[in-house]
Image (spheres, rainbow, N blue to C red):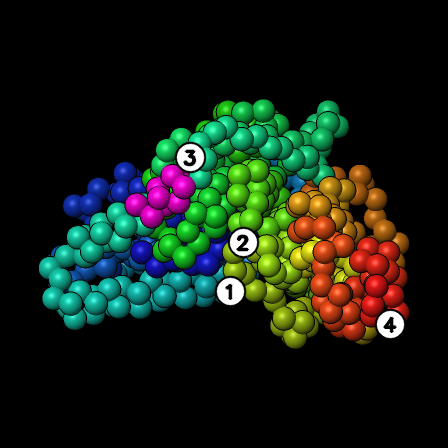
Amino acid sequence: QTWLAATGHVGTMPSFMQALLREIQPETIAPGDVYISNDPWLQAGHTADVFITVPVFRGEQLLGFTISTVHHLDVGGRSGSGTTEEVYEEGLILPIMRLYRAGEPNADLFRLLRRNVRYSEKVIGDLHAQIAACRVGGQRLVELADEQGLASLEPAADAIIGRTEANMRAGIRALPDGVYRTAIELDQRDEAGRPLRIVLTVTIREDELWADFTGTSLQVRRPINAPIQYAYAYVVVGTKLVCDPNLPNNLGTFRPIHISAPEGCLFNPRFPAPVFWRITSGMLIADLMLQVFGQVVPERVPAQSGSLPTWQFYFWGQRVSGEPFILHQHAFGGMGGRPGKDGLAAVSFPYSVREVSAEGCEIETPLLVERRELIPDSGGAGRWRGGPGEELAIRVAPGADIDLRRPVLFAGAAGRLTNPAVGLLGGRPGRPARILLDGQAVDPAAIGNSPEIRFTTETLTLQLPGGGGYGDPRLRDRARVAWDVKNGYVTADAARALYGLDAEGTG
């Protein structure tokens, strides 16, 4: 399989392939077939992530499969809205089906896609790019098998998966047996106005781990529910980071780890629950897993990270001609301080996703990026400082091709507006996030379960949260504090108040 970098993508591929092989009988698979699905209950948890799977043949022999998945700009419906109440509003739902059969395109499905998405040229182009990536991966698999003289890839795959599983089990076995509990309160609330909670109980016994979400809030009629296979991926990544972060990503990392969540809760929602912004709740599972391991091996985990959850969002608008435009963007908070190292600044921890550049934003849309910079004092103080979050300020470019009678809509996923990333072993919390319009802070309560903000001539500013500090700030090396002040990570006032550093860099 061809693995991608994002945890929610990589971590749902094993279960997706199992579902595909249940749906498509192996004997019916032919060279030139291409399979597609974006069913949130089968793959990465929301409709925008489209999975493309291509069988790899050497002659008439089926060697295996390659998979690619991409977050698409548009899948129809109200995709990207923070107010959807059913998954039906979040675009087309494609069950596992053939996009190509024996090399021939499914013309009816392509017509359906073109008619139901706003940016069909881009969407269809991206689908073909995914297919091309899978085919290149397939060629490499055939070359590998030929080069090594392998009649089949199955023995090698079984060996890799088996070794991965053995190492994961060894890492779990090295942890103390026990039952560990933690919880976190989200910024979001349920329909009755009660804060949503994630409750996690982890049981470690010998070489296996169980993660149970009993006590977690029930699913809500807002798009922040996360299907269970997505939650499973973040349980696994949190465990892998502690037990053996250098292991390859495959089914072997999953086998020693088990997950349970009551049906109808945030992490096992019943269809047709809205799920588009499932990262709002689901990504926090990685932080909760690290909190649990902080009770067991604090010398191997960071403090809480402002990078969880990632802020992922859209800007929607309309040009003077009536043509719509859209920008899909990310912004990142700071990682928590770590044993022996400061937290990274504005990073997509614990996975790897890059931001859209300011230049790309300004080429594709009539929006202007006024600034993108790190926020001083946003990282929590500690012996090892939390990473600072970033500030992103965007407005409509002067004289731009935009119909100002229709405000630009900002909608997406956000987090840590009211509950900052906490420190570990005496470290201070990071600064919480804020959203501002022309410098005036928007009340988090007014944002609701998922932010939707409209603006025309105002500047929208996103101030991302900082990571928590690790260890007592009084133990931080004076030279590091002075370096932070010199380079703008920490102000002189904060250096005095939190670290006891005077203007001369001593103290």
Q: Which residue is mark 3?
A: 209
Residue beneath the point at 53% across and 39% down: 296
Tally the numbered discs. Answer: 4
Above or below 196: residue 436: below
Please tell me the numbered disc located at residue 271: none
Residue 478, located in which quarter of the rendered image? bottom right
Q: Which residues are magenta?
A: 166-174
Image location (x, y in percent) of residue 228: 47, 36
Label 4, label 1: how far apart the Cα atoms are: 56 Å
Q: State yes or no: discs 3 and 1 in contact (Cβ < 8 Å).
A: no
Which sits earlier in the primary sequence, circle 4 or circle 2?
2
How would you rate the neighbour count of disc 3 (Cα within 10 Å): few for under 14, some for 14-19, many for 20 or more? many
Q: Position of residue 413 (x, y in %)?
A: 65, 48
Q: Quadrant of residue 408?
A: bottom right
Disc 4 marks which residue? 504
Local crowd size for mark 1, using a 10 Å CA cut-off: few (<14), some (14–19), many (≥20): some
Which residue does the numbered mark 1 point to in the structure image? Answer: 122
Q: Amino acid at mark 3?
A: Leu
Q: Earlier in the sequence, mark 3 or mark 2?
A: 3
Q: Are marks 4 and 2 in contact (CB under 8 Å)?
A: no
Q: Earlier in the sequence, mark 3 or mark 1?
A: 1
Give the amino acid type for the residue marked by disc 4 in the picture: Glu
Residue 208 position in % (x across, y down): 38, 35
- Seen in the picture, residue 387 relative to 87 is either above or below; the reply is below
Q: Earlier in the sequence, mark 4 or mark 1?
A: 1
Q: Residue at x 82, y 55 (%)?
A: 498
Residue in the picture at 36% in, 66% down: 133
Q: Quadrant of the N terminus?
A: bottom left
Instruction: Give the residue type that dot 1 points to.
Output: Lys
